[in-house]
Image (cartoon, grey):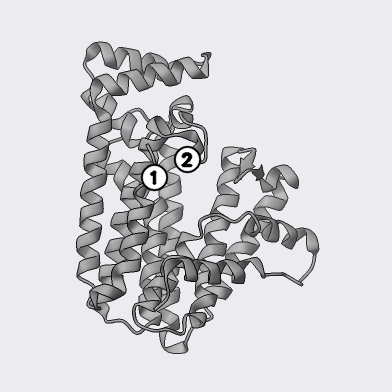
């Protein structure tokens, strides 16, 4: 049984050693560039950890684990292009280093490469793994479209938002865990329990992200605080604030949402003050805790000795304990 740190070292070493010898170089250079940026690599780590609940030869799942990491980075590459973002993980985004067309095409290549890596698994599991991954890839596209649609709406409901983050964020975490379980020859019940665990912790993690964007420490959070407020992103915090605000608070919030010229620091301070008055921080924390507790219940249903689940429990707690 490996620790999460040992497994992370293994997958980091494997991914960092990836090189693409095919040509033209201008197609593959952005792929290597994106993968060299690092990141938490939580998705391949979860796959290895799920597999390690049942088997020790974790190197057998390096292919599919690499596939989910390449796929995740492909989505980030295209997200940056759609958002016209300048930076990713402290480095210039691909479309800024090269151009928009190269970013599109290199992203497409990453999607194909991801499928090649995912397919590197025993033939008896191949169809199930590919079907699950394909379903997940479609769901992530659906979640991204929902998120884009929300930008044009002022009436987004809480249930819609939770469904969007389930699709956009949680399903890839869940699929990483389930693929690891499938390849480890886990029972159907265990694989499904790990999938539910991934969905629930994924939703909790995104709710925490919403919270940290308002109340986090920029040095710990890893990005500037208030970015969601500045761009009017439909987060859980904003949706609940609009739902619970009185008439005066509603008017103030909507004035900030419609303002085209403003001082960013003033908008962040004013909207945060409204959130404090309305009490949405506690509402978000409560829902986040509910999803976390549900995730722990799903993990407890996995039929392996408790000591084998200890690393997953520790990792989950560490992910949910980022500083406010």
Element on which disc 2 rests: helix
The quadrant of the rendering that contains the N terminus is bottom left
Res 30 seen here: yes
Residue 262, how many percent across, how many down? 51, 14
Res 166 seen here: no
Q: How far apart are the alpha carbons under marks 2 and 1? A: 7 Å
Position above or below: 22 against 26: below
Q: Which residue is mark 2?
A: 220
The residue sitting at 39% across, 16% down in the picture is: 270
Q: Nearer the viewer, residue 129 or 305?
A: 305
Q: Which residue is mark 1?
A: 322
Element on which disc 1 rests: loop
Asked whether the residues under the numbered discs 2 and 1 touch, taking CB atoms below 8 Å apart as contact, a structural biologist would say yes
Question: Dot 1, crowdedness within 10 Å: few (<14), some or many (≥20)?
Answer: some
Residue 15, how many percent across, how many down? 61, 68
Quadrant of residue 111 in the image?
A: bottom right
């Amino acid at each position: 049984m490996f620790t999460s740190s040992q497994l992370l070292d293994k997958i980091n070493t494997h991914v960092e050693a990836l090189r693409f010898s095919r040509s033209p170089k201008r197609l593959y250079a952005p792929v290597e560039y994106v993968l060299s940026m690092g990141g938490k690599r939580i998705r391949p780590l979860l796959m290895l950890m799920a597999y390690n609940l049942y088997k020790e030869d974790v190197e057998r799942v390096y292919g599919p684990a690499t596939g989910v990491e390449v796929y995740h980075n492909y989505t980030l590459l295209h997200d940056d292009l759609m958002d016209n973002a300048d930076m990713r993980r402290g480095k210039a985004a691909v479309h800024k280093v090269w151009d928009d067309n190269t970013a599109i095409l290199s992203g497409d290549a990453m999607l194909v490469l991801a499928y090649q890596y995912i397919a590197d698994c025993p033939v008896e599991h191949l169809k199930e793994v590919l079907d699950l991954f394909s379903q997940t890839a479609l769901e992530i596209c659906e979640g991204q479209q929902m998120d884009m649609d929300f930008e044009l709406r002022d009436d987004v409901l809480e249930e819609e938002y939770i469904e969007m983050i389930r699709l956009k964020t949680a399903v890839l975490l869940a699929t990483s865990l389930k693929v690891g379980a499938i390849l480890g020859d886990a029972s159907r019940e265990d694989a499904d329990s790990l999938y539910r665990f991934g969905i629930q912790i994924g939703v909790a993690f995104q709710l925490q992200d919403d919270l940290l964007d308002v109340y986090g420490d920029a040095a710990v959070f890893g990005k500037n605080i208030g970015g969601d407020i500045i761009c009017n992103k439909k987060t859980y915090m904003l949706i609940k604030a609009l739902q619970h605000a009185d008439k005066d608070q509603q008017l103030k919030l909507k004035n900030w949402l419609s303002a085209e010229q403003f001082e960013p620091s003033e908008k962040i301070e004013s909207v945060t003050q409204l959130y404090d008055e309305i009490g949405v921080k506690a509402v978000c924390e409560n829902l986040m805790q509910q999803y976390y507790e549900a995730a722990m219940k799903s993990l407890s249903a996995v039929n392996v000795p408790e000591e084998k689940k200890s690393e997953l429990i520790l990792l989950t707690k560490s992910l949910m304990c980022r500083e406010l």
